[in-house]
């Protein structure tokens, strides 16, 4: 039977299903498998089911000559050297379609929390600062208006579109920019510069690639509307964190909601963590029970199809099947 390695236990019963189709070994620890150990465990394996915390680079491929299929339990695949896989005709599966709504929900949660200063207000109450000598007053935790504000969406893929649907319900005007020039109903398509200059809220929903790395750099941040809020649930590495922190500290921007960091887990000396007007989360965009089970199921469906000699239902480099 073909051997497959899964780099971590997955939610639901997905791996039990996979185990019916192969000789399956699963990394038993909750922490990511060290890269050198991953290469060792992959010896003799044709398949790898991985997570976004596993780097699948050229070095790993070179060390694993038997590897023929890779399936990642993620929609983003910036942790994988896709071109190297394609050169070796290794299909790479991912999990689109099931996490757009969940991620868009978190996107709106961060937008609302940043705009209405919810974490700051939460700390204020818990720290006992709200007391008779300091009662309610009209200027207390005043935030930004959401209805009637303009939301600029950078990237109008399935998550960007799900954000647009939600924002419409909040009475926001929508601008959008996408590299492909895709038109989305109800979203006015404009240049990236115009999105940044005109939006009260900017939502980053573009995939990380060599074209989008540092897309929102210091110059782009300087071009944002004064007092705007930036939300990133896409990937760290798209936004220049140092420049963002400076803009937030100087008051050029009002606040930010950040779920993804250039380096994860984020280092405690990251300047964004020092700022009260930044709401942070540890890359939990797709973290709901149903979504995580669906992602695991799709990752396993991709691997089972590959083991059967079929096309993966969700393949990032389908040209390998031609
Ligand atoms: C992905 O799938 O790429 C998300 O970032 C994690 O769910």
Image (cartoon, rainbow, N blue to C red):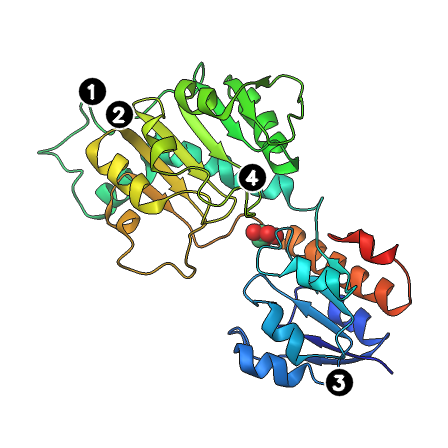
Which residue bears the numbered disc 1? 138
Near mark 3 (Cα within 10 A), the count class, few <14, some 14-19 or many ≥20, is: some
Task: Name the residue beneath numbered marker 2.
Answer: 142
> Mark 4 highlights which residue?
206
Looking at the rendered image, the disc whose residue lies closer to the viewer, 4 or 2, is: 4
Is label 4 or label 1 in front?
4
| Residue 110: image tag | none
Q: Which residue sits furthest top?
A: 148
From the viewer's perspective, is 299 left or right of 154? right
Q: CA distance from mark 4 to mark 2?
A: 30 Å
Compared with residue 122, is residue 18 higher up or lower down, i.e. above or below? below
Q: Position of residue 321 (x, y in %)?
A: 86, 57
In the rendered image, residue 185, in percent from the top left (x then y), is placed at 67, 18
Q: Around disc 1, counting alpha carbons within 10 Å, would you say few (fewer than 14), some (14 to 19), or many (20 or more)?
A: few
- Label 4 and label 1: CA atoms lie apart by 38 Å
Q: Is residue 130 visible?
A: yes
Closer to the observer: label 3 or label 2?
3
Name the residue at 42% across, 50% down: 281
Q: Which residue is mark 3?
A: 44
Mark 4 / mark 2, whichever is N-terminal: 2
SS category of the residue bearing label 1: loop
Q: CA distance from mark 1 to mark 3?
A: 67 Å
Q: Quadrant of residue 67?
A: bottom right
- Rounded to the nearest angstrom, the CA distance separating label 2 from label 1 is 8 Å
Secondary element type, mark 3: loop
Separation of residues labelled 3 and 4 (CA atoms) = 36 Å
Above or below 202: residue 274: below
Residue 178, image x, y percentages: 59, 29
Residue at position x 44%, y 29% from top?
A: 202
Whether residues under marks 2 and 1 lie with C-beta atoms below 8 angstroms apart, the answer is: yes
């Amino acid at each position: 039977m073909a051997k497959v390695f899964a780099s971590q236990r997955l939610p639901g019963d997905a791996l039990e299903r996979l185990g019916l189709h192969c000789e399956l070994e699963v990394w038993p620890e909750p922490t990511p498998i060290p890269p050198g150990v991953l290469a060792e465990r992959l010896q003799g394996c044709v398949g790898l089911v991985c997570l976004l915390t596993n780097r699948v680079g050229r070095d790993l491929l070179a060390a694993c000559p038997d590897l023929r299929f890779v399936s990642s339990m993620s929609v983003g695949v910036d942790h994988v050297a896709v071109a190297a896989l394609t050169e070796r005709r290794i299909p790479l599966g991912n999990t689109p379609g099931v996490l757009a709504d969940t991620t868009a929900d978190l996107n709106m949660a961060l937008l609302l929390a940043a705009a209405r200063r919810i974490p700051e207000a939460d700390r204020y109450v818990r720290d006992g600062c709200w007391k008779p000598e300091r009662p309610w007053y009209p200027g207390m935790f005043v935030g930004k208006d959401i209805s009637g504000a303009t939301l600029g969406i950078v990237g109008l893929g399935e998550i960007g579109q799900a954000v647009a649907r939600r924002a419409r319900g909040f009475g926001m005007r929508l601008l959008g920019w996408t590299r492909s020039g895709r038109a989305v109903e109800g979203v006015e398509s404009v240049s990236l510069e115009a999105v940044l200059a005109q939006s009260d809220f900017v939502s980053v929903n573009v995939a990380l690639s060599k074209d989008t790395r540092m897309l929102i750099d210091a110059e782009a941040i300087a071009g944002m509307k004064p007092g705007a809020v930036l939300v990133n649930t896409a990937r760290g590495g798209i936004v220049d964190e140092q420049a963002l922190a400076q803009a937030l500290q100087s008051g050029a921007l009002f606040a930010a909601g950040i779920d993804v960091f250039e380096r994860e887990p984020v280092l405690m000396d990251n300047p964004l963590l020092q700022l009260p007007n930044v709401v942070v989360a540890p890359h939990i965009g797709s973290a709901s029970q149903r979504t995580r089970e669906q992602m695991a199921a799709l990752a396993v469906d991709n691997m089972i199809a590959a083991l059967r000699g079929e096309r993966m239902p969700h393949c990032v480099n389908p040209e390998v099947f031609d």
